[in-house]
Structure formats: structure tokens, C-alpha cells
Amino acid sequence: MARALLEALRRRDVLADHVRTIADADAMARAGSYDVLVLDRRLPDGEGLDLVAALRQRKHPVPILVLTALGGVDHRVDGLDSGADDYLAKPFAIEELLARLRALQRRGPAVSDRYLNFGNLSVDPKTSEISVGGSFIEFPRREYLVLETLMRRPNRIVTRPSLTEAVYALEDEIGSNALDAHISRIRKKLFLAEATVEIRAVRNIGYLIRAKA
Amino acid sequence: MARALLEALRRRDVLADHVRTIADADAMARAGSYDVLVLDRRLPDGEGLDLVAALRQRKHPVPILVLTALGGVDHRVDGLDSGADDYLAKPFAIEELLARLRALQRRGPAVSDRYLNFGNLSVDPKTSEISVGGSFIEFPRREYLVLETLMRRPNRIVTRPSLTEAVYALEDEIGSNALDAHISRIRKKLFLAEATVEIRAVRNIGYLIRAKA
DNA sequence: CTGCGTGTAATGTAGCCGCAATCTTTGGCT
DNA sequence: AGCCAAAGATTGCGGCTACATTACACGCAG
């Protein structure tokens, strides 16, 4: 079953690791940074719920979904009360498991490194292409870097230092309003392309991109 | 069914409110401070999932569990992907629903640890964002600092020196009623946003934030 | 040479915030 | 209960400063 699940995940470009024992899972959870943990109750070296309890006692924040063949209501209640975040009885549809994983992952930090979409604006970090409402716009390199950086955190403030670092990397570039000028030029292009997003300044802090008023 | 559920919750000393329509639920979510929302899909004025989408679009943080008679895998996937946190098909055992609610509520504070919630007011110190009933309000820097400081100790008095220190840090700024002016402006914004909290003065000592009379 | 990208500087603009004047509330005192 | 003084509330004004915009200059590439 693990193999089938791994295959289904891989096909959807979800990265996953698999171990067989509670001890290994514990070690992985300690060492790595995972968005979600899928756990079977019956394991070679014990009861999966014990790991849930142990992780929660250490205040480990990873969302946990418990799988089991024990489908009775009582078992499900035990599973959830042990500290797990979701509980799914076998047999189950892969699609439902995936949907539940998405729901759990949404709780955590959203990190997808494919297209950055927001409003009718779309940025492809792979090719550095930007399109508004389906039609592509050319952006000079600096302007593109600023916009991509903002699009990586839509609706969130990006500080001025973050932006300058993103655009000027190692280069020392301090002593002008170059960043402001870039922002202004980006705004003009977005406006002409009738984008549904806008770049707003946050005084003393930085900028953010968000849905147009 | 709502009556049975309310009865079961009441017997376990869980406080719950019940409304019948999406419109009412939306209003309650804006106004009140709830640990979790239980939502039926079939409602007199529409599809429950639409409310989920609306709340999530406003970044409303409340955990949502969706109930439905539509038990197919596809429906469950849709439900979870709309932004809900859990999905339960009717018929279900009350005990399982209660366990799932406990799981959601447990996760609520864990996630919202970084949020300061009180009444329908929510402050995110990480991003310096403030929302009332799910919709965000812009606050200038000084006003934000005052409000965050108050929200760190709801129902507790914060002394004038504490507040000025929080707002003016190292800077020497003594010699006017600037703090009072900030309080006044914050009050106006909160009032316009229909917040369920209010800022009260404590003569000769300071201010406190508490539930609105 | 020409055109584009980009940094710089000058100028315009907006909004935060401190100040102070004025009004309201509160609590103590007779 | 009534009065007064002090604390608090509110609001308009103005200065300051960060941000916005634009023109221009320089450099590099074709």
C-alpha cells in the first residue's frame, strides 16, 4: 500500500519519504521538515498512535493523518483524541486521501515552486516570463526580479531589505531610490496591461502585492 | 439534526450557537470569536461550500468542518479543497463528530498561537496585520503598536508608561497627549469596523481592551 | 549611432503623527 | 446632590518625511 501511495503522490509532484518503523518515523520527524505525516496504526515495532502522542508531547507541530484498518467509531475517536489531525479508515479512495492531505498542508506554510499566480497575473520563475490575463509582457531583468519577489508572497509585506537583496544580490547598491523607480515602472506596465493586482507601499517597511481595490 | 447536535454539545459543556442560513453564519463568523465552525452543505439560501470559499478568501482563520449527505469521494474532495479543514458524511456517530471537533480545536490555538485573538479582533504580530471579523484593516505604525500591546493582555490593564514605551521605544517622546490621540483614532477605526471589543480608560493608570458592553 | 536598461536626482504628493485647543467625563469633596 | 478640578476624548492643523513620478545621463549592445 505504501508503494501505491508513493506512486500516486509522485505522479502529482508531491515529494514524499517512506519508512517502515515508528523509530525511523520519529527520527525523520525530528530531523526533517515535513508538511504532513501519514501514519499507519499497525507497525512492526508498535502502535502508531504512540508516536502521535510522543510527538505531541514534544509539541511537534507537524500535521498528522492516521491510517488504519480499524474502522470502528471508537477507534477513530481514539485516533483523533491522541493528537492526530485527521483519521482515515481503510479501504479508502486515493483521491480522498490526497484531498485530506491538501487540507492539512494548507495549514502550514504554502510553498509551491511552480507558477506564481495571483489575480490575473502569472509569473513563471523557470522561464522568467510574466503574463497578465494570458498575454505576455516583457520585463527588464531588475523589474522582473522585484515583481517575482513580491509574487512569492502575495498579500504579504516584503521588506525593503528583502527586495534590494533579491534584486542586487551581492552587489552593493545603496544610495538612491532605484527600488522606488523600479516599482514605479512596474506599476505603469501593470496598469497598461489592466492587471487586477496592485503594488502598495507600506510606510517604513516595504511593499506588498495584492488585489486591486 | 441541529437540535440533537446542540443537545449533545450542551451535555458536554461545549458552548455553541446555531443559525440556519449562510447569511447568518457569515454574520456570526464576522462578529463572534469561535473555535470551530460546523457547516452543512445543503442550506436554505445556498451551498455551504460557498461560505467556506468566502471566508477563506477573507483569510478568516476559523477551522471549518463540513457536514453533508453527499457521501461520495468526489464530494468529499471538493469539500476539502474548497478550504474546509474536515469533512464528515451523514450519517455519522455523534462521538466521531465530537472527536473531530476536538481535533480541530486543538489545532486552532496551535496555529493561531501566532495570532492574538480577542472578540472578533485578530492581530498577527508576524505580519502586523489586523482583521476584524475576517476583513483586514489598515493601521498606521504607531496605532498598530498601541493596539498590539493592548491585545497582548486582553482584559488586563496596560499602564500608560508601558504603552508609551511600547510605541516610542528608545525615542524620547514625552510632552503631549499623543497616546490619547492614538487611542482615539484606533477607537474610531474599530467602531467603523464593528468590532466587538472596546478600549476603556482606567483613570490615572492606563488602558485595557475588553469585550464591548 | 541608436535604443534600451538602469541608476540618479529633482520635484511633487500624501499621510502619519505630534500638538494644542476644546469638549466631555469622572471622581472627590462639601 | 451638586460643584469643581483634573483626566480623558476628540478633532483640526501643520510640519515632516517617506514614497511617487518623471526627466536625464550613462553604459552597453546591436
Image (cartoon, coloured by chain):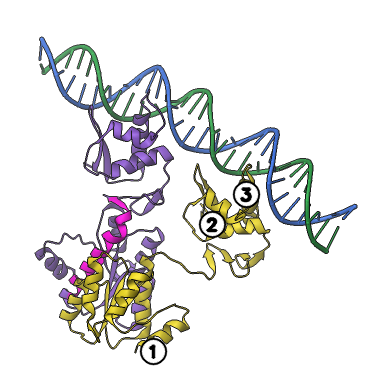
Chain colours: A yellow, B purple, C blue, D green
Residue tagged by mark 2?
A150
- Image quadrant of residue D5? top left
Q: Nearer the viewer, residue C13 or B126?
A: B126
Instruction: Say if labels 1 and 3 share a chain.
Output: yes
Alpha carbon separation for disc pair 1 and 2: 38 Å
Q: Amino acid at mark 1?
A: Ala
Residue depicted at 21% across the width and 42% down the height: B155
Residue tagged by mark 3?
A172
Q: Secondary structure at mark 2?
A: helix
Q: Amino acid at mark 2?
A: Leu
Instruction: Say if labels 1 and 2 share a chain.
Output: yes
Q: Residues within 10 Å of mark 2 (few under 14, many from 20)?
A: many
Residue tagged by mark 1?
A4
- Of discs 1 and 3, which sits in the foreground? 3
Q: Residues within 10 Å of mark 1 (few under 14, many from 20)?
A: few
Q: Compared to A66, does B182 lie above or below?
A: above
Q: Amino acid at mark 3?
A: Asp
Magenta highlight range: B96-117
- Image quadrant of residue B181? top left
